[in-house]
Amino acid sequence: MRSVGVAILGGSGASEPVRVRVPMPDIVLPRLLRRPARFLSRIDFELPPRFGLKATAAFLVAIGLYGVVLGGHVETMVGGATAAAGLKINGIRISGQSETAELEVLQRLAIPEHGSLLTLDIDAARERVEQIPWVAEATLRKVYPDTLQVEIVERVPFALWQRDGNLALIDVEGTVLSDYVAPRYRHLPVLVGAGAQSEAAEIVALIGEFPTLHPRVRAATLVSGRRWNLTLDNDIVVMLPETDPVPALIQLEALDQSQQLLSRDIISVDLRLADRVVVGLDEVIHADVVEAVADRREEAVR
């Protein structure tokens, strides 16, 4: 290998630049590369003072940054730095809630102790808040330098759904809002049966079309996911047909108005057949009726 000129200048003790000359290789280079190689061999490269120390420090910093990126700690590091710079979340304003507990909202926000407003993922935080059953919609706004505003739109209680013998509060879409029913919601329609919550809007709207019958309905039970039974305030069960129950209810109202059918001593009214109404009697009353009919037949024979 040809001359390698390496010289350390100065002997006074002060750090001096280091000059390095690129050596010419001993191998025979292609003609195209010979001239650039000779040119580089004549150039002295000057390294700055303490180059080795600075290069080592830069290498260690690079390794540290690589570790931060690889470990997914960039957001934490940036968040800590911006929080220290005055962007730490110091206030959270929650509005629009009446049934939703503020503590539950704060838990869903999941803001760390030294969380930064700048690095807060506002979309992810909103999605977590909207997972609360009572919350229909949440809007989050950053108010710099240190405040987060949370506006909540709550779901509206629509009916009570009985499942496994227990009541739950639901909205019009059938979303369960709470397994605890406060006294102020006890007046809501009661739906019973698997899948009844999904049909809440339909059955409540149907009953609402009959103003004389509506206030007397105590519960609506979905049978086999196909049709409804209505339980009235005097425990009479009205069996509706599977399809198009409106004509059946019109007929029921007409019979009640003309014959006070729903005020009689009966236990059920079967409207499932389009050409007839079948009335079910109480067992005691049924026995009395059978006995009375038998007596009349005996008298007729005599």
Image: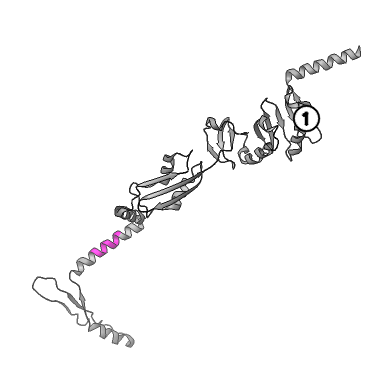
Compared to residue 63, the image places residue 227 above or below, namely above
Say how the picture is coloured. Answer: one colour
Q: Work out which quarter of the rendered image holds the N terminus and state it.
A: bottom left
Q: To which quarter of the image does residue 281 belong?
A: top right
Residue 173 image point, x, y percent: 59, 43
Q: Work out which quarter of the rendered image holds the C terminus and state it.
A: top right
Q: Nearer the viewer, residue 148 or 3?
A: 148
Q: Nearer the viewer, residue 29 or 249?
A: 249
Asked if residue 59 is among those painted magenta in the image, a careful observer would answer yes
Compared to residue 206, the image places residue 9 above or below, namely below
Residue sitting at x 29%, y 85%: 36
Residue 52 image point, x, y percent: 20, 68
Asked whether the viewer can see residue 28, the reply is no
Residue 204 image point, x, y percent: 65, 38
Amino acid at pointer 1: Leu
Per the image, label 1 sits on a secondary structure element best described as: helix
Residue range highlighted in magenta: 57-64
Q: Main secondary structure of the magenta part?
A: helix
Asked if residue 205 is among those painted magenta in the image, a careful observer would answer no
The answer to whether residue 125 is left or right of residue 209 is: left
Residue sitting at x 43%, y 44%: 94
Residue sitting at x 45%, y 44%: 95
The answer to whether residue 11 is left or right of residue 44 is: left
Residue matched to label 1: 255
Residue 71 image point, x, y percent: 35, 55
Asked whether the viewer can see residue 137, the reply is yes
Q: Residues within 10 Å of mark 1 (few under 14, many from 20)?
A: some
The answer to whether residue 65 is left or right of residue 236 is: left
Q: To which quarter of the image does residue 54 belong?
A: bottom left
